[in-house]
Amino acid sequence: MRVAIYTELQQLDQRLSALAQARDALLAQLAERDQLQTWRQRVDELTRALKGERAHSTDLQWELEEVELRLAALDEQERDGPSDPLVAREMAVLRERRAQLEEQVLTHLERIGELERQLAEVERKVRDATAAWAAREPHLQAELERISRELEALQAQRQQVAARLSPDALALYDDLQRRHRGTALAPIRHRQCGICRARLPAAVFDLLAAPDPLVRCPRCGRVLYLPSEPSDATPS
């Protein structure tokens, strides 16, 4: 009887494990919402950075225009009158500043171009992911709810089955399940343990003939049972 209960428990545990894996896979897919939120945050960051670069670029261009206007005025002054050392010095300073500003404006324009490229790429990802998510989320949520209900029902069923075992027998089963990754039982095939292939002595079959036997493989420790078609499981 205990082996039959173990068999029922193991079948339930295998179903529970498969459902838990399916649930975890669904949760991983639902976690894609976090990636979508990350992309949206990235859009905000790039938008702010682009706004700042454009504002700075505008300021530099205004300053550059002022320098150009001042240089034009000084150049006209030099042509109309005698050469002034102070004017010549100021023009030299302005020309140097103009070169610096032109280089800075060019650098900012390159940054603006790169930010615009990045922003367009991330916005495309957000659009694509939002559309795909809108189509997938209802199905994923419905499937997650179905699996959660089935898990809850199976867990309740397992508790009922486990209650039919003594505490010691249940503890043994749970320990074997943990140690052997979900295979607490082993069928007997060709007078061997069907899992670890250990050759079973005749005494094992004598023990199996007793009422409600709980016989373990001498090598792997799993609980042995005779399959439903034991053509060559028992000794002749």
Image (spheres, rainbow, N blue to C red):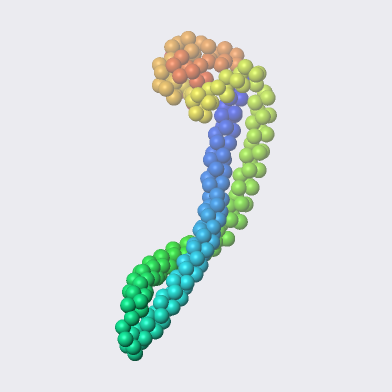
Picture quadrant where residue 75 is located: bottom left
For residue 110, above or below residue 173:
below
Could one spot residue 106 in this view of the protein? no
Residue 181: x %, y % from top left = 50, 28
Residue 23 pos. (x, y %): 57, 43
Residue at image coords 50%, 24% = 179
Please state, as top left, top right, bottom left or bottom right, where the N terminus lies in the image. top right
- Answer left or right for 50 relative to 2: left
On the picture, is 134 further left or further right than 84?
right
* Front residue of 187 and 176: 176
Q: Is residue 73 left or right of residue 52?
A: left
Please say if 34 is above or below 112. Answer: above
| Name of the residue lying farthest toward the bottom | 80
- Name the residue rendered at 41%, 80% in the picture: 70
The answer to whether residue 161 is seen in the rendering is yes
Residue occupying the point 65% across, 19% down: 167
- Front residue (pair 52, 173): 52
Q: Is residue 230 above or below residue 134?
A: above
Q: Write the residue at 61% across / 18% down.
A: 169
Residue 176 horizontal/vertical position (percent): 53, 22
Say how many tags the image has.
0
Q: Quadrant of the C terminus?
A: top left
Comparing 115 with 67, the one in front is 67
Q: Position of residue 221 (x, y in %)?
A: 49, 18
Q: Foreground residue, 128 or 229?
A: 128
Q: Quadrant of residue 194?
A: top left
